[in-house]
């Protein structure tokens, strides 16, 4: 089916309607027969209704004309949707019913008074534009309601090419949004997808032999023949890609509508309001864009940085920005530098903001650059009916679900990458978890993960079905069952990660896949496996690190502070040395936080009464003298570091503080989790210093959006904290961090 055939059907219908009007006394003044809706757009499918309205001036009585016109149309066998209204009644009906208003935006003259048709069309467009700010929220609610009922064209098992999200109805709504003059949409891309979907609809109705827009399983093969495609799978991919493209344009356009409606009415500023969010990147009207100073040709990480910022802020990654970054950014080095990996994990862990940014990356070629393996699962249907999405969308949804579980695992970065890659083996002849493991390992190595993390990711991909399958088919209380599972996992670390991945995978599959019953079985099995695996106290955390030379100035005066900076891969290593005292680590952390230096890792220890801390940071342009002066000012009290670093700001992750008594035999271990933000280490150390508690070792790491900082602490006179004292320390640290989180109330 082609646009030519649709036009031929419309032309034949036009002749039928005009003939009926003229043959039964229709006049050229005061009365007009008009087509509206799809017929108004001349887009008749084989079994479409003829939507027509007989409009007359208020002072004109059409008499029996309407009844005379309808009868020959009924006699012809046409499906007729008709109305008779005065001009004023037509305008009033549009004001009262949004669906009527949308149909009248496509008014087209068929017969009678052309000036009346023109006046009606002009009035409808003028009122639509005038009342747009008032009507668009109602339209958005109707669209969302339809989406909830009909599902997505790209993923529904029996998709409706007209009413589903990403279908023809959405394309018509987009044209209405553009008609408001408030926003624009990529017209060429939208029109290409819309016309292709019209071809699909015509074929679907021809196959069904009736007015049906749903594609049942039996229709895919004949649809493939009609479209000239190889098989039913190719037909599914074609149709679902069209739906996904319209969905992407629709989401982007509605975001822009929301931004316009959020602005006060009045004169718009001549220049866009740019709020810098990262080097070369700014936020403008809810979209992440590039600044004039941006130099993507010299920054291979800028695409990832822009995507992470957009996803975390639940903002739009402007397609033009993404396309430019894809064209101009140099390829990422292999293996990826640490910052690239951190940005990618931040993107994956952003929650709901990930979906639209991921779609933009896919539409603009960004995924092909970042993850060439994505093409293996792109638009791949799931074999299991329990899944509500295609494989590629499912793994994105799994990441979204996993982002809410990162507080429960030690390695959020490993969890997020495993969530993305757990189904990467789908489509292979072998079992997908087996096929996916080597692929996932190769990707992890390319991303710069170390051997241990690569093993974790590979194991999670290989075993991602283990807990759910065993819990559903074996007795979790049977020691043999527990031993079998535990032996395949090997450690509590893997178990905790797998439990989180299992939950995220099930929730992403369908709402029924993680019922309370199934969740209870899986958690019961995991609890028994945890007992079987036992706990490993791990390193003591208070061992003496490799000794460093102590400057003479510190040896002569322990109150003096020494700061040195050495180049390191992708950053620098900052060493701070001074006489050991409670609060020294807090001061060093404040020095870096106030300079906005991103801390990637830190270690602190004592050697012969001298306190040493080594900080791995992501900034190669540090001035030792500036850092030393800043630290000296903090030590002497000339700078209120705590006051400046404890100012409240918005946080996605509320801070948690846990005491880990099993982690060390000679110290008390506090595990702190919070949003990755400057000042966390300082605030923790300062709160402990207030209690005269000494930090003997600090282990700082950033895992995507989450800072996981582990502190080995002792009483000032040495020795682990008692149970009450440990609880006091944990409460003090949590209170200090909570004070920095803005209330959402």
Image (cartoon, rainbow, N blue to C red):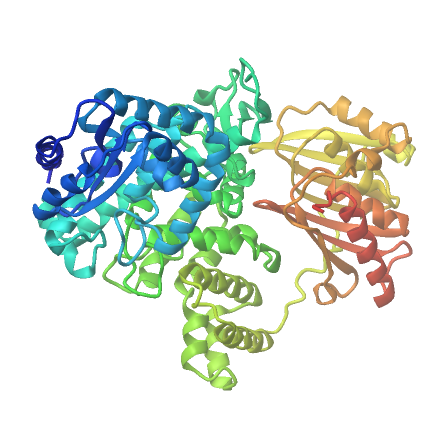
In the picture as drawn, the residue positioned furthest to the bottom comes out as: 478
For this rendering, which residue is in front, 631 or 472?
472
- Left or right: where does residue 162 sit relative to residue 698? left
Residue 398 in view (yes/no) = yes
In the rendered image, which quarter is residue 175 located in?
Answer: top left
- Left or right: where does residue 669 sit relative to residue 198? right
Asked if residue 7 is positioned above or below residue 694 in the image, the reply reads above
Asked if residue 519 is positioned above or below residue 355 in the image, the reply reads below
**Residue occupying image coordinates x 56% and y 64%:** 496
**Residue occupying image coordinates x 82% and y 30%:** 631
- Left or right: where does residue 740 sit relative to residue 53? right
Residue 412 location in percent, x, y?
56, 52
In the picture as drawn, the residue positioned furthest to the top comes out as: 270
Residue 479 location in percent, x, y?
51, 85
Residue 269 location in percent, x, y?
56, 16
> Across the whole image, how many numbered discs are drawn on residues?
0
- Left or right: where does residue 40 sit relative to residue 272? left
For this rendering, which residue is in front, 677 or 745?
745
Image quarter in which the N terminus is found? top left
Residue 520 location in percent, x, y?
53, 75
In the rendered image, which quarter is residue 664 located in?
Answer: bottom right
**Residue occupying image coordinates x 43% and y 26%:** 129
């Amino acid at each position: 089916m082609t646009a030519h055939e649709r036009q031929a059907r419309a032309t034949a219908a036009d002749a039928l309607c005009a003939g009926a009007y003229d043959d039964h006394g229709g006049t050229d003044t005061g009365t007009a027969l008009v087509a509206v809706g799809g017929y108004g757009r001349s887009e008749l499918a084989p079994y479409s209704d003829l939507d027509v309205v007989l409009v007359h001036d208020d002072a004109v009585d059409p008499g029996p004309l309407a009844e005379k016109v309808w009868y020959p149309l009924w006699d012809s066998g046409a499906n007729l949707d008709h109305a008779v209204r005065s001009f004023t009644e037509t305008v009033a009906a549009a004001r009262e019913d949004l669906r009527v208003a949308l149909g009248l935006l496509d008014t087209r003259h068929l017969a009678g008074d052309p000036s009346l048709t023109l006046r009606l069309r002009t009035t409808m467009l003028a009122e639509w534009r005038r009342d747009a700010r008032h009507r668009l929220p109602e339209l958005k609610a109707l669209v969302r309601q339809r989406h909830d009922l009909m599902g997505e064209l790209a993923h529904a098992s029996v998709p409706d090419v007209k009413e589903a999200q990403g279908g023809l109805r959405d394309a018509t709504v987009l044209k209405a949004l553009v008609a408001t003059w408030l926003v624009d949409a990529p017209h060429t891309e939208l029109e290409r997808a819309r016309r292709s979907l019209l071809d699909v609809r015509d074929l679907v109705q021809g196959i069904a032999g009736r007015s049906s827009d749903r594609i049942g399983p039996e229709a895919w093969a004949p649809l493939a023949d009609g479209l000239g495609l190889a098989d039913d799978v190719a037909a599914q991919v074609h149709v679902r890609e069209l739906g996904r493209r319209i969905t992407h344009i629709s989401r982007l356009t509605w975001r822009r509508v929301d931004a316009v409606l959020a602005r006060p009415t009045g004169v718009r500023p001549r220049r866009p309001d740019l709020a810098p969010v990262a080097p070369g990147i700014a936020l403008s009207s809810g979209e992440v864009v590039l600044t004039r100073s941006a130099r993507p040709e010299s920054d291979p990480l800028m695409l990832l940085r822009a995507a992470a910022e957009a996803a975390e802020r639940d903002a739009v990654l402007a397609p033009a920005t993404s396309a430019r970054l894809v064209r101009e950014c140099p390829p990422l080095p292999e293996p990826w530098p640490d910052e690239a990996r951190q940005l990618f994990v931040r993107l994956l862990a952003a929650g709901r903001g990930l979906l639209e940014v991921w779609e933009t990356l896919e539409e603009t070629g960004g995924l092909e650059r970042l993850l060439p393996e994505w093409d293996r699962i792109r638009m791949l249907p799931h074999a299991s009916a329990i899944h509500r999405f295609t494989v590629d969308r499912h793994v994105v949804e799994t990441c979204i679900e996993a982002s809410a579980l990162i507080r429960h695992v030690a390695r959020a970065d490993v969890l997020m990458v495993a969530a993305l890659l757990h189904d990467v083996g789908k489509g292979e002849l072998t079992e997908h978890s087996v096929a996916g493991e080597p692929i996932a390992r190769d990707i992890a190595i390319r991303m710069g993960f170390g051997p241990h993390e690569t093993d974790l990711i590979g194991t999670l991909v290989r075993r991602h079905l283990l807990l759910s399958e065993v819990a559903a088919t074996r007795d979790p209380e049977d020691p043999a069952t527990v031993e079998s599972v535990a032996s395949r996992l090997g450690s509590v670390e893997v178990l905790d990660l797998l439990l989180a991945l299992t939950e995220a995978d099930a929730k992403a599959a369908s709402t029924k896949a993680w019922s309370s019953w199934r969740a209870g079985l899986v958690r019961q099995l995991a609890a028994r496996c945890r007992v079987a695996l036992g706990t490993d106290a791990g390193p003591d955390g208070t061992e003496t690190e490799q000794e460093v030379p102590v400057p003479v100035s510190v040896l002569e005066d322990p109150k003096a502070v020494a700061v040195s900076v050495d180049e390191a891969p992708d950053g620098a290593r900052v060493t701070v040395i001074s006489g050991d005292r409670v609060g020294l680590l807090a001061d060093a952390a404040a020095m870096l936080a106030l300079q906005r230096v991103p801390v990637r890792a830190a270690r602190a220890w004592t050697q012969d009464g001298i306190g040493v801390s080594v900080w791995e940071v992501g900034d190669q342009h540090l001035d030792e003298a500036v850092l030393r002066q800043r630290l000296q000012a903090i030590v002497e009290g000339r700078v209120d570091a705590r006051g400046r670093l404890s100012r409240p700001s918005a946080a996605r992750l509320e801070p948690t503080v846990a005491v880990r008594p099993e982690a060390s035999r000679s110290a008390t271990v506090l595990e702190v989790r919070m949003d990755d933000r400057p000042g966390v280490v300082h605030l923790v150390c300062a709160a402990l210093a207030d209690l005269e508690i000494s930090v003997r070792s600090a282990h700082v790491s950033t895992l995507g959006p989450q800072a996981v900082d582990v502190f080995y602490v002792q009483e000032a006179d040495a020795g682990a904290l008692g149970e009450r004292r440990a609880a006091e320390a944990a409460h003090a640290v949590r209170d200090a961090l909570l004070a920095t989180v803005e209330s959402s109330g």
